Image: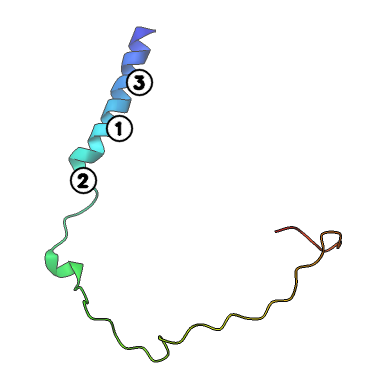
C-alpha cells in the first residue's frame, strides 16, 4: 500500500507545484495591455435616476399559477 500512497503524493505534489513554475500564460508586452482612462466621460442622462416600472401586487399563495418567490 505504501508505493501507491507515494505515487499519489508525487502526482499531487507535481500538480500543485507545476502551475507555479510554468506561469499562467504567454508573456505580454506592456504596449499590449492598453491604456487607463482616468477621466469619466460625460454621458447625457447619466445623472438622472432610472425610472422603475410599476409592478402589480403579488398573487396570493392559494392562486394555482403562483410558483413562489
Where's the C terminus, which quadrant?
Answer: bottom right
Please tell me how crowded label 2 is: few (under 14), some (14-19), or many (20+) other residues with Cα within 10 Å. few
Dot 1: what SS? Answer: helix
Task: Specify whether 10 is left or right of 55.
Answer: left
Q: How is the image coloured?
A: rainbow
Say which label, 1 or 2, has the lower sequence index: 1
What residue is shown with label 2? 23
Task: Name the disc covering residue 8, or none.
Answer: 3
Instruction: State how far apart marks 2 and 3 are (Cα).
Output: 23 Å
The vertical placement of 42 against 23, above or below, is below
- Most distant residue in the bottom direction: 44
The vertical placement of 15 against 67, above or below, is above
Dot 3: what SS? Answer: helix
Say which label, 3 or 1, has the lower sequence index: 3
Task: Specify whether 1 is left or right of 15.
Answer: right
Say which label, 2 or 3, has the lower sequence index: 3
Task: Name the disc covering residue 15, or none.
Answer: 1
Q: Position of residue 17 (x, y in %)?
A: 24, 33
Residue sitting at x 75%, y 68%: 58
Q: Quadrant of residue 1?
A: top left
Dot 2: what SS? Answer: loop
Amino acid at each position: 500500500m505504501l508505493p501507491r500512497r507515494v505515487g499519489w503524493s508525487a502526482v499531487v505534489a507535481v500538480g500543485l507545484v507545476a502551475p507555479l513554475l510554468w506561469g499562467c500564460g504567454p508573456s505580454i508586452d506592456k504596449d499590449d495591455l492598453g491604456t487607463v482612462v482616468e477621466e469619466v466621460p460625460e454621458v447625457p442622462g447619466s445623472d438622472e435616476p432610472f425610472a422603475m416600472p410599476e409592478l402589480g401586487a403579488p398573487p396570493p399563495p392559494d392562486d394555482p399559477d403562483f410558483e413562489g418567490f
